[in-house]
Amino acid sequence: MTTVKAYASPSATDDLIATTIERREVGPNDVLIEIKFAGICHSDIHTVRGDWGPQQYPLVPGHEIAGVVTQVGSAVTKHAVGDRVGVGCMVNSCKECANCLKGEEQYCLKGMVGTYGAVDRDGTITQGGYSSHVVVTEDFVVRIPEGLDLDVAAPLLCAGITTYSPLRHWGAGPGKKVAVVGLGGLGHMAVKVAHAMGADVTVLSQSLKKQEDGLRLGADHYYATSDENTFKELAGTFDLIINTVSASIDISSYLQLLALEGALVNVGAPAEPLPVNAFALIGGRRSFAGSMIGGIRETQEMLDFCAEHGIGAEIEVIPAEKINDAYERVLASDVRYRFVIDTATL
């Protein structure tokens, strides 16, 4: 075991505090990563505050990890000391089920192992990226291309792949009309990626206060959902809608915005159920679907795509002592668009 610096949540109600945690020794198939930057995801807040179920504390969140390899195990072939690498939302899976064999480890039938707050194959509870170092099996470490700075690359390991995967799966591209609901940490990445894929992109946000940003990031159109005329004007318009918000919205109203055979894909994960009127689906052979991150192969594809198109997250880099303030600002939608922790400040 190796002791490393970290920021952890002591309970569902306490602020995160500076502490130390134990990392396992580097095994034959492991990679030791010196973490340089760690993004703050809304799901970090949901998890440490128990919104998605009870947790085992203390808990170190963080699954948007960018850093440099400092040690590799004797059997490692995919990474070398000095490589720029990333770790996203999972650090293990069974590697044997049908979904894992397809390269869709996020849908492992035996349950993928989350980067923090999950039971790993050895029975330990995983601890995340708000720390100085992490040990991860080589199969769940991806390469960060030279064209991407580590700070703007960190959020790509969750926000980037969470939006890239459904855009790729549902065929966003030239001739397709894509709407993005919400312009936050996920939404701003969806806009950038959909634009780079060649789609016609519309942002649907509560108000027009981020309109200038949305257009700068690549949106072709921007509408306020607080204006009831928006839903009348855009009825039957979109081939694909990516819903990025983590709050309850009137899904049936948004389904009416889909063209024939269009799909509304949820990537935000509100704690409460989202009721759907069946007639909103039946009326246009529409689909209401969900999508969760991407497999390791697709995550690498996403990073290469982002490097090729010059896409990084819009970030605000903070020192570790500002994490609790950042949490409150995320909840108040006061970030443009992703907080990234400089782990040198741990």
Image: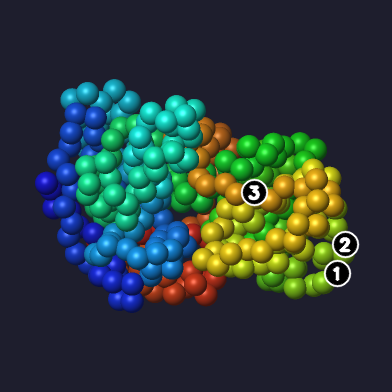
Q: Amino acid at mark 1?
A: Asn
Looking at the image, residue 294 lies above or below residue 154:
above
Can residue 37 be seen here? The reply is no
Q: Nearer the viewer, mark 2 or mark 3?
A: 3
Taking the image as shown, residue 241 lies to the left or right of residue 279, namely: left
Q: Is there CB contact under 8 Å for labels 1 and 2?
A: yes
Task: Indicate whether 52 appears above or below 236.
Answer: below
**At 66% from the left edge and 44% from the top edge, which residue is drawn?**
194
In front of the other: 221 or 317: 221
Of badges 3 and 1, the one in the foreground is: 3
Q: State how far apart marks 1 and 2 are (Cα).
A: 6 Å
Instruction: Locate residue 110, reporting x and y percent.
Output: 39, 40
**Could you say whether the residue bearing mark 2 is in a helix, strand or loop?**
helix
Relative to 204, is 236 on the left or the right? right
Circle nearer the N terminus (2, 3): 2
Return the residue nearer the eye: 26 or 120: 120
Q: Residue at x 19, y 29 (%)?
A: 28
Residue closest to the eye, 31 or 310: 31
Q: Residue at x 54, y 71 (%)?
A: 333
Q: Position of residue 301 (x, y in %)?
A: 52, 32
Q: Amino acid at mark 2?
A: Glu
Residue type highlighted by circle 3: Ala
Q: Position of residue 71 (x, y in %)?
A: 20, 35
**Quadrant of the rendered image containing residue 62:** bottom left
**The label number, if any, that marks residue 289 in the structure image:** 3
Which class describes the residues within 10 Å of circle 1: few (<14), some (14-19), or many (20+)? few
**Furthest residue toward right:** 233
Q: Residue at x 54, y 59 (%)?
A: 269
**Residue underneath mark 1:** 229
* Residue 233 image label: 2
Residue 5 is at least partly visible in this image: yes
